[in-house]
Image (tube, grey):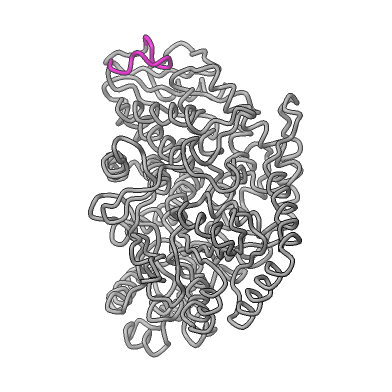
Amino acid sequence: MNNELHLSPSLYLQQHKDNPVHWKQWGDKIWKEAERKDKLVIVSIGYSSCHWCHVMEHECFEHEEAADVMNAHYISIKVDREERPDIDHIYMTAVQLMSGQGGWPLNVVCLPDKRPIWGATYVPRDKWMQTLLQIQKLYKQEPEKVRMYADELQEGLQATELLPQDNEAGVDTSWLKERESRVLQMRDRDWGGYNRAPKFPMPWEQIFHLMSAETFQLPEMNMHMLTTLQKMKDGGIYDVLGGGFCRYAVDGRWKVPHFEKMLYDNAQLLNLYGIAFRRSGNSEFRDVLYSINQMLQLIFLNENGLYGSAIDADSEGEEGKYYTWTKEELKAIAGDDYPVLEAIYDLNEPWEERYILFRLKDNETAAKELDKSIHDIESTLENVHEKLLEARNKRIAPAIDRKSIAGWNGLLITGFVHAYQATGDDMWKTQAEDLASNAITHLKKDGSWQRINSEGNVYNPAQLEDIAALCQGFLSLFSVTGQEPWFVEAEVLVELALAKFSDDDSPFFYTTSSDSEHVIQRSRDLEDNVIPSPNALMADALRLYCAVAYKPELEDRWKAMVKHAGAISREVKSGFYLWGVLYLKMAADNHKEWVISGENSISLLTDITQTFHDFHTDLFVLTDASNHDHALFQGRWQKKTRHFVCQGKHCHAPVETVEEAMGVIRQ
């Protein structure tokens, strides 16, 4: 059989196993074959829930004539970007250099030595075939010209990895304040976010703006972010029936989503809405946490206790069919309660002849218009939502990509901890502990961390994203439980990062380990995106680790990473979100650790964090004498509750009450 994708555990590759294209899986054997035959290679990258990946498959890869062109002149490789983000990153960078834009599906033509010479995202069938024939003809007639272009592009790729030379400058936040002022000028005052479309939830960017609002005394920014989160929650991007958020909105009002749902988005949105709830007291933000969790537990949770990666945008061959309604369906299901739906949701402006539950009015406004009490509106709406969800559950559901990705599950551990801190509900902490335990059990092979578990197949060595996100998750869990095994696991991950991912020429880490297969060049991947830079995640993990263990050389390292990232951001003016949070923590020079020691430390923490959130204070519990050896905890354990507020490796005298500790923090 020419198409070998049926051998892969990847759902995305399995989706292409019946294509007439002679797809191969990435591997040294295939590249050696390309060199031996001197054939160009198509590297086509996507993921299982990608709508436009499906479209291009139907138009091109399922089409015999297009497949004939590919099979006759090329070796074709399919790559799941979620399995191999290192491959995706390097070729995405190349395509952005060539065309100024990127996205998925990502299609790249490479020389037999893996160097790219052409790339694009979605391409219609006729243009796809025409382009492939032109490239093949050029390579056959003028191979040196093609190789010269590959050389130039390779130089461009190498240039993207260059770092600023001056890393000795002091920490200055004035440029960030100026940038935040410009962000305010670009904001959408009515709908939140930027004044453009599409609109993406960007959890760490939004957390950074909340922190900037406090740091620089920008009440407009604080209000803008709270408005943004409310509009996201009211938008069609939010699944008010089944819970959770879709990937992004194609319009400027958060109304029409791109209907795929990703684990990494919803994991980080637990962080964002948890922080926003603690700072604003808006109970709707608290409700969002439980809504996300409803979806996670019912849909994403696998039998092994890990969480899958994505829910497809399409069902029955149509994007959004599962989530949208005809007006006749809504009337039939809601019955006499339909006027309440009509008063709250936009049921006058259809999307592709169907309706999205896009909230235009709050319950109070609807109650006044319908001359009902708010309680009646809430009760009716809850009842109708249940009926709609019951009806929706009878439809053919979108496919779920059940493969578990180590880094994304690490992000979710941290998300569960944030939700626990925001609500005080032990359920979240239990979920975080269960997930952490299952990650240790099901994401290792022969004792080594792996990136993927797909139906029991554990494979692909962990990349920096996985190491850093898991480390951050274990340390977050340690901070709220005081359980030593979580710190031990984090310490092992720190040592692994230092041993196998370090860059000898900079404080940063490479995204792949020193003993893994690499793509053209080892990348550092420094720009924060929807998922923060793996290096930013690692810097935050080192910060938390050093807070407990007091490691001066690692403290210097994470701060050097943040300073370097700041210098880069001043030049490129983007991708500085988690980095920005770390920069402001470092720049303020007043970051504190609050240690709650004693038998009742966990119950006290549960009470404190629901109303207390300070960007410059990390809380830790010392539950017994077993953690006595950590530098942060030495000499601080006794059964009776005591509070220690530490700053710059110096701890104030212990106090006995929360109020006294708060007073020390506010000094």
Task: Tell which of 88 and 598 is nearer to you.
Answer: 88
Task: Tell which of 444 and 322 is nearer to you.
Answer: 444
Question: Is residue 343 visible to the viewer in this orientation of the structure?
Answer: no
User: Where's residue 34, x and y in %?
Assistant: 54, 60
Q: Quadrant of the C terminus?
A: top right
User: Where's residue 567, x and y in %?
Assistant: 72, 36
Question: Is residue 390 visible to the viewer in this orientation of the structure?
Answer: yes
Quarter holding residue 27 = bottom left
Question: Residue 628 lies in magenta, yes or no?
Answer: yes
Q: Quadrant of the N terminus?
A: bottom left
User: Where's residue 423, x and y in %?
Assistant: 37, 44
In the drawing, does residue 596 fall left or right of residue 353? left
In the drawing, does residue 81 fall left or right of residue 378? right
At 51% across and 33% down in the image, what residue appears?
501
Magenta residues span 625-635
Q: Residue furthest toward the bottom? A: 328
Measured along the vertical axis of the image, is residue 213 above or below residue 486? Answer: below
In the drawing, does residue 643 fall left or right of residue 85? left
Quarter holding residue 14 = bottom left
Task: Count the labels in the image.
Answer: 0
Task: Tell which of 546 and 561 is nearer to you.
Answer: 561
Task: Tell which of 157 and 665 is nearer to you.
Answer: 157
Question: Residue 205 lies in magenta, yes or no?
Answer: no
Q: Residue furthest toward the front? A: 36
User: Where's residue 593, x and y in %?
Assistant: 48, 23
At 68% across and 39% down in the image, what residue appears?
217
